[in-house]
Amino acid sequence: MDLIAGICVTCILLLLPPMLCFGIVGPMVVSLMSSQLETVGKTAGTVYFTSTFGGIAATFFLGLYFIPVAGLRWCATVTGLALAALPVVYIAKRAFGGSDVAGIGDAGSKDFGGNRGPGSSDPGYSCRHR
């Protein structure tokens, strides 16, 4: 395998799994935070605004302050440890602290009006957009 092909394969193998996992986070957070169908849009906007704002702030903070002061190795290590610690804390809270983690609650119990339809007894059912 030549150099360019090896670089491409290595990048795909090393970067694809974390990129997929980071891509899953936003929709999962929206799903966990949405309690009603009517609030999904507002929740998604809030989640993606917070994500974008945090990414921009972290970029400037790390790039202009922390990396010049502490060095790249220390910043990468702290970021990696923080990203690894978050799921551990979440799992520990779920296992030992009950089902309600940070106000999220049980995400699997949401009813987004799935029983609505032409045969439903819901008087508010309508085929047109409200």
Image: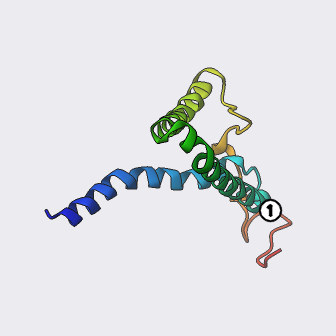
Measuring from the top left, give residue 26's x and y in whole percent. 61, 54
Residue 102 drawn at (x, y percent) = 71, 34
29 versus 117 height, above or below: above
Q: Residue at x 79, y 77 (%)?
A: 129
The correct choice, above or below, for 117 with respect to 60 in the image is: below
Q: Nearer the viewer, residue 106 or 58?
A: 58
The residue that disc 1 covers is 121
Q: Residues within 10 Å of mark 1 (few under 14, many from 20)?
A: few
Image coordinates for residue 78, horizontal then vertical, percent: 52, 34
Please name the residue shown 75% across and 49% down the image. Answer: 35
Where residue 48 appears, as percent x and y from the top left, is: 68, 58
Instruction: Name which residue lies at 70% across and 32% down.
Output: 100
Which image quarter holds the N terminus?
A: bottom left
Camera-nearest residue between 23 and 28: 23
Q: Residue furthest bottom?
A: 128
Q: Residue furthest right?
A: 123
**Left or right: residue 41 compared with residue 86:** right
The secondary element bearing badge 1 is classed as loop
Front-lying residue, 84 or 20: 84
- Residue furthest out toward the top: 96
* Residue name at image x 60 percent, y 52 percent: 59
**For the C terminus, which image quadrant?**
bottom right
Q: Is residue 107 above or below residue 118?
A: above
Q: Amino acid at mark 1?
A: Ser
